Image: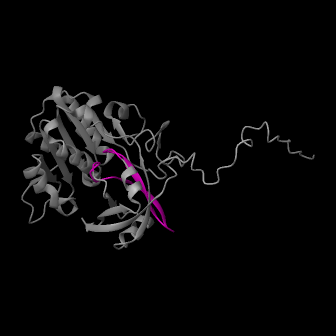
């Protein structure tokens, strides 16, 4: 059976009547935009994590790249792929962007071998963010487990740069062992300069560790919680959310004032690959920031 291609009239077909835009400049979305950038600094945080400071090459594009605490970007290593990473720098800093990278796969292993001046591609920002303006005038509890301190660093910067807008700001941070703690060089600045109270704990200490040992929930003994005037941000392993948020809800903090970041299994950043799908929700598009009430209604989210 022969198939005949239907005739198209360029004068009447809405798609053919317009001049083709081969550069697609009129229809480009931020998901398509790749910012050319280079590595200008690398900080080795632990055996498996490094902090990369990136500078967008074009000054105009550098000013245009605008993100909010909690959002993420797609970092491309040419020839090897791209990975989704939380933006860990200040949202007010237009000179550079910082990303914390854990060595956990082929692309990130290659990235860990990069040197200063390496050229990379950056897309974004993507996803939802923490409602920092909504928290003004209240206390903030920032709770992180392990690598969860990376996405918390941006809201810490926000609280530091707008310190007069918030009451008490507490950071509760726990890791399995002292060697896994991130950004240790900033702890003194957060406490002494920015008046942020830092509480740390490890599950298993070493001979040099002088702090507390145990689970992160034990740090609640050091914090006086005003449930009617407190917002909470929690980042870390999803299993941690149940224990932390359940405890705080028992203290009287409403679930819609507790926010978590679900970044597991994200891959493309645009809801196309379906790897981050939880029920009918794409964590890369509808998240990664959710209030805890919404998380409880997402099957298999935690």
* Residue 164 horizontal/vertical position (percent): 13, 38
Given residues 205 and 94, the one toward you in this image is: 94
* Residue 290 horizontal/vertical position (percent): 35, 37
Residue 68, located in which quarter of the rendered image?
A: top left
Q: Is residue 80 magenta?
A: yes
Q: Residue at x 14, y 52 (%)?
A: 201
Q: Is residue 162 left or right of residue 97?
A: left
Residue 76, located in which quarter of the rendered image?
A: bottom left
* Residue 268 horizontal/vertical position (percent): 49, 52
Is residue 130 visible in this depiction of the protein? Answer: yes
Q: Residue at x 33, y 30 (%)?
A: 293
Q: Residue at x 16, y 60 (%)?
A: 184
Given residues 96 and 282, the one toward you in this image is: 96
Is residue 251 visible in this depiction of the protein? Answer: no
* Magenta stretch, residue numbers: 67-92
* Residue 24 horizontal/vertical position (percent): 60, 50
Given residues 113 and 293, the one toward you in this image is: 113
Q: Quadrant of the C terminus?
A: top left
């Amino acid at each position: 059976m022969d198939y005949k291609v239907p005739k198209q009239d360029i004068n009447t077909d809405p798609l053919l009547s317009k001049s083709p835009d081969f550069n697609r400049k009129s229809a480009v979305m931020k998901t398509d935009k790749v910012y050319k950038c280079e590595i200008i600094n690398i900080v080795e945080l632990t055996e498996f994590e490094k902090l990369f400071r990136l500078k967008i090459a074009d000054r105009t594009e550098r000013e245009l790249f605008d993100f909010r605490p909690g959002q993420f970007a797609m970092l491309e290593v040419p020839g090897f792929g791209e990975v989704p990473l939380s933006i860990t720098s200040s949202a007010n800093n237009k000179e550079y962007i910082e990303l914390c990278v854990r060595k956990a796969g082929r692309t990130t292993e290659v990235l860990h071998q990069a040197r200063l001046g390496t050229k990379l591609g950056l897309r974004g920002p993507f996803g939802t963010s923490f409602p920092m303006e909504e928290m003004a005038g209240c206390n903030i509890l920032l709770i992180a487990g392990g690598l969860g301190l990376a996405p918390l660093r941006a809201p810490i910067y926000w609280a530091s740069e707008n310190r007069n807008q918030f009451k008490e700001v507490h950071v509760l941070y726990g890791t399995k062992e002292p060697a896994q703690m991130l950004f240790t060089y900033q702890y003194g600045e957060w406490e002494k300069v920015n008046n942020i109270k830092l509480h740390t704990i490890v599950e298993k200490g070493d001979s040099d560790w002088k702090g507390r040992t145990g689970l992160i929930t034990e740090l609640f003994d050091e914090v006086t919680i005003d449930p009617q005037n407190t917002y909470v941000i929690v980042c870390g392993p999803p299993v941690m959310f149940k224990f932390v948020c359940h405890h705080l809800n028992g203290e009287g903090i409403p679930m819609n004032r507790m926010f978590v970041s679900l970044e597991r299994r994200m891959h493309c950043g645009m809801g196309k690959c379906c790897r981050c799908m939880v029920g009918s929700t794409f964590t890369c598009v509808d998240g990664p920031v959710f209030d805890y009430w919404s998380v409880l209604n997402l099957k298999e989210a935690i």
